[in-house]
Amino acid sequence: MDETMKEILELARKKMRESGEYDREAFRQYIKESIDYYLEKGRLTEEDNLDLIQEQLMELLNDIEDREADE
């Protein structure tokens, strides 16, 4: 996972913790919001495979749920 994807994931996790929502749809929304944020900041472009980034991050949901439960 590259650095930008890690940062997107951390931002999405932060949003999850702040909202207290840990379901799949909430996580999908936080990933999308985080990707949009990085698009605005110029860290990502429309030329990046944004759908693939979102899919790869969504695959990490089970691991994230486990980590959040431990914290």
Image (tube, helix red, strand yellow):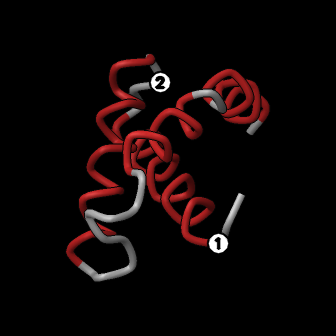
Q: Give 20 or 3, whichever is nearer the viewer.
A: 3
**How many discs appear?**
2
**Cα distance between the residues tagged 2 and 1:** 23 Å
Q: Quadrant of residue 26?
A: top left
Query: Which residue sits at x=40%, y=62%?
Result: 48
The 10 Å Cα crowd at callout 2, few under 14, some 14 to 19, many 20 or more, is some
Query: Which residue sits at x=44%, y=17%?
Result: 23
Give me the disc on residue 16.
none
* For residue 63, side relative to residue 44 (left or right): right
Q: Secondary structure at mark 2?
A: loop
- Residue 56, given in percent of the width and then of the height, sits at 59, 38
Q: Give 37 or 46, whichever is nearer the viewer.
A: 46
- Quarter of the image with the N terminus in it: bottom right
Give me the disc on residue 3.
1
- Residue 61, given in percent of the width and then of the height, sits at 61, 27
Tag in front: 2 or 1: 1
Q: Give 61 or 55, whichever is nearer the viewer.
A: 55
Q: Quadrant of residue 24?
A: top left
Query: Which residue sits at x=71%, y=26%?
Result: 69
Could you tell me the amino acid type at mark 1?
Answer: Glu
Residue at which label 2 appears: 22
* For residue 11, side relative to residue 25 (left or right): right
Could you tell me the amino acid type at mark 2?
Answer: Tyr
* For residue 13, side relative to residue 3 (left or right): left
Q: Are marks 2 and 1 in contact (CB under 8 Å)?
A: no
- Quarter of the image with the C terminus in it: top right
Residue lying farthest to the bottom in this orientation: 42
